[in-house]
Image (tube, rainbow, N blue to C red):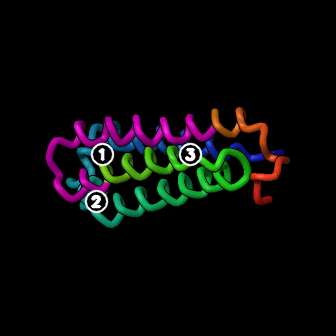
Amino acid sequence: MKLNLDGLGITASIACAIHCAVLPLIFTSLPLLGVDLIQDKGFEFSMIGLAFAIGCYALWHGWKRHHHSFLPFTLLFAGFFFLVLKEILRTHLVWMVIPALVLIVSAHYLNYKLCRKANHCHTTDCNH
């Protein structure tokens, strides 16, 4: 069975968006129990780091083997810039999460489309 890395990246991005949107609603009572994941910067940066690692690997695979376009990387890095900025500023969370999600999912979708469109994998300009 072949793993679709872009599908995994899109799933991770959507899971991150759900985490950012739903976690505050579900876990608002956790501080009463002494657990505060919502404000834990270590947890948040770990989630961002995991999603970034998956995204970079998925895009690198598509870039190296198929399309050689840096545009998906540009979109991915811009999206993660907004996620990190959200954690640093801690203001206007929605206005940082929405463009982050759109950019990251767009990067994976573009990578997917470019991989499917690439027909040059056995020509002289390909390095594998």
Determine whether the residue tagged by mark 1 lies in a helix, strand or loop.
helix
Specify the segment rendered in magenta: 84-112
Determine whether the residue tagged by mark 3 lies in a helix, strand or loop.
helix
What is the x, y in percent for residue 3?
74, 47
Task: Give the position of the C terminus as an image quadrant.
Answer: bottom right
- Which of the 4 image quadrants contains residue 67? top right
Q: Is residue 76 left or right of residue 21?
A: right
Spatial separation of the CA atoms under disc 2 and disc 1:
9 Å
Is the residue under label 1 in contact with that under label 2 (CB below 8 Å)?
yes
Spatial separation of the CA atoms under disc 3 and disc 2:
29 Å
Q: Amino acid at mark 1?
A: Phe
Name the disc covering residue 9, or none.
3
- The residue indicated by pointer 1 is 27
Q: Amino acid at mark 3?
A: Gly
In depth, the one of 73 and 28 nearer the eye is: 73
Q: Amino acid at mark 2?
A: Val
